[in-house]
Image (cartoon, coloured by chain):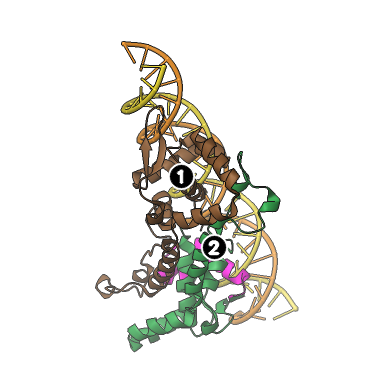
Chain colours: A green, B brown, C yellow, D orange
DNA sequence: CTAAACTCGGATACTTATTATCTTAGTTCT
DNA sequence: AGAACTAAGATAATAAGTATCCGAGTTTAG
């Protein structure tokens, strides 16, 4: 089980956007984080498609959070980039083999699938409780005011 | 993010082993679940390497749980087959770029990585609370006694 | 009003991990 | 002692993730 690397980049980008003044182009975000510009663009497009960020085209364009950072959870970002389908997908192997259950006997979810689904709900719940604003506030707390201002200026350029 | 299909098979196999009388060969387990025998063998080998099941070679060989089913959690099986490394791996991109943090400033874990780690701990905790015996007991509850006996006889052959 | 420069968006190669298979080595019963 | 059955490791095919390029649209400046 491995989470796509683009997820990590997307979360960091959202935090940066929450602390920026205006739109920030994808290329600027890539340079800021020292990652591949073209691949980061792919993740940002996923955020745009999910409606988490707004993409402004044109010469002074870039990405902006489409909602207040406090209303964007980490889970929202993860689902937008990594996809909404759960990590565990029951293949209903209980219906296979010489003692396979008949479809009409499978009204209830497979017991194994239920355990895995509960765990995944716990995972999602933990991510849903943290917002981009929470992370941004923490970062702001450990960043000197002078550097924070320098970053904002560099992003606006 | 996708969990390996072999994980689902391994959990089902452990449940079957907890309800069997003697050793069950990999080929029999594959036929019972209607899955690829050779690939299932790979997952069973992982369980054997982790010490969750004991492999008996020879003509009447097969796999047996090496511990009582109540002492084997679903998490044990998942980690054995899928590997122990977490789904989210922090690449420390906060150290990159023009405003990258110096290594000596990174004593504490990255705030993003901490959020993801907390979520993953919640996921693991949910899986650790359920044992193979728990699932076995549920399956026993919804299976007619006659069929349960037939299954045990078929597994022993 | 025209044109140039800069932006995002989708479609296209490459790399890595997962899935599936085969062959080899070891153990037990006849 | 031999034969048959078992698991274990090493080896190909497939799918997902990673990285990249080129085209469509918009805004600003002349």
Determine the residue located farthest toward the front in the rendered image.
B145
In which quadrant of the rendered view does residue B122 lie?
A: bottom left
Q: Residues within 10 Å of mark 2 (few under 14, many from 20)?
A: many
What is the x, y in percent for residue B142? 59, 54
Nearest the eye: A59 or B126:
B126
Q: As rendered, which of B139 and A84 lies closer to the eye? A: B139
- Residue B92: x and y, percent? 35, 67
Q: Secondary structure at mark 2?
A: helix
Q: Is residue B28 left or right of residue B111?
A: right
Quarter-of-image position of residue A111? bottom right
Q: Which mark is residue A117?
A: 2
Q: Does residue B23 lie above or below A117 as drawn? A: above
Q: Residue furthest toward the left?
A: B104
Residue B63 appears anywhere in the view: yes
Label 1 resides on the chain identified as: B
Name the chain under label 2.
Answer: A
Please provide the residue range marked out in magenta.
Answer: A29-52
């Amino acid at each position: 089980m491995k989470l796509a690397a683009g997820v990590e980049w997307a979360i960091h980008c959202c935090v940066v956007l929450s602390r920026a003044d205006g739109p920030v182009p994808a290329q600027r975000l890539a340079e800021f984080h020292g990652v591949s510009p073209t691949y980061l663009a792919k993740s940002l497009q996923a955020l745009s498609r999910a409606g988490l960020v707004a993409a402004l085209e044109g010469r002074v364009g870039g990405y902006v959070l489409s909602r207040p950072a406090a209303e964007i959870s980490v889970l929202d970002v993860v689902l937008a980039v990594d996809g909404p389908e759960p990590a565990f997908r029951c293949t209903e192997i209980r219906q296979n083999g010489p003692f396979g259950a008949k479809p009409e006997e499978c009204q209830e979810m497979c017991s194994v699938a239920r355990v895995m689904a509960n765990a995944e709900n716990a995972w999602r719940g933990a991510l849903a409780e943290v917002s981009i604003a929470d992370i941004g506030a923490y970062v702001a707390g450990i960043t000197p005011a002078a550097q924070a201002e320098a970053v904002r200026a560099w992003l606006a350029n």
